Amino acid sequence: MKTFKKYIIFIIAAILIGVLFLINKDMGFKAVSTIKSSSKEMILILPPIFILLGLMDVWVPRDTMVKFMGEGSGIIGGILSFIIGSAAAGPLYVVFPVAIAFMKKGVKFSNILILIGAWSTTKIPMLLFESTSLGLNFMLTRLAVNIPIILIMTFVMTKILKDDEIAAIYEGAKEQEG
């Protein structure tokens, strides 16, 4: 039963695609094609990320992560989280294994949220693309709006979530395989 619960979303999606094939065969083929394309992208992106996370796990001591990004890190931890998130490569789904690895290393919850926010909105390659295709003013305006929003969301989330809820998130991260 535990295995069934673990794959329930996959099973439901497979059933829905089967129903889609019965209703509209062309749309069903398009859905399968999209799934194949997304799966191929994930297969090419995730292994190098997991290798880098494994190396980080071995090469970067927990004490170092706690010192620079843990509870007592202050503004330096937030800045490092922002820089790491902005310098990141890869789609948004890659940040979640990174966040789990950081949680296991003792990174402060607010720094995890900053990392996720920066990864999703302020990646350097995206900023370069925006400045060349949409103009420097657009890029700077969007950046000026996004940075405060990341900080506000981080502040609100850390205030809304109770300590035991944050502890449960960290416990869930520890239970992840890898």
Image (spheres, rainbow, N blue to C red):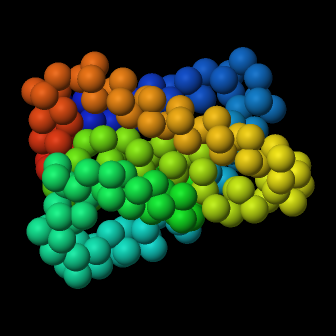
Nearest the viewer among 84 and 143 is 143
| Quarter of image, res 44 | bottom right
**Res. 145 visible in picture:** yes
Nearest the viewer among 117 and 151 is 151
Residue 63 drawn at (x, y percent):
12, 68
Nearest the viewer among 173 and 161 is 161
Quadrant of the rendering where the C terminus is positioned: bottom left
**Res. 39 visible in picture:** no
| Quarter of image, res 131 | bottom right
Residue positioned most to the bottom? 59
Which residue appears at 80% of the width and 32% of the height?
Answer: 26
Quadrant of the rendering where the N terminus is positioned: top left
Above or below, comparing residue 25 to residue 116 in the picture = above
Residue positioned most to the front? 75
Q: Is residue 147 left or right of residue 157?
A: right
Which residue appears at 42% of the width and 50% of the height?
Answer: 115
Nearest the viewer among 172 and 20 is 172
Numbered circles on residues, count: 0
Residue 86 drawn at (x, y percent):
54, 58
Residue 20 drawn at (x, y percent):
66, 23
Residue 144 drawn at (x, y percent):
65, 41
Which residue appears at 75% of the width and 62% of the height?
Answer: 128
Above or below, comparing residue 28 to residue 34 in the picture = above
Q: Is residue 86 left or right of residue 57?
A: right
| Quarter of image, res 143 | top right
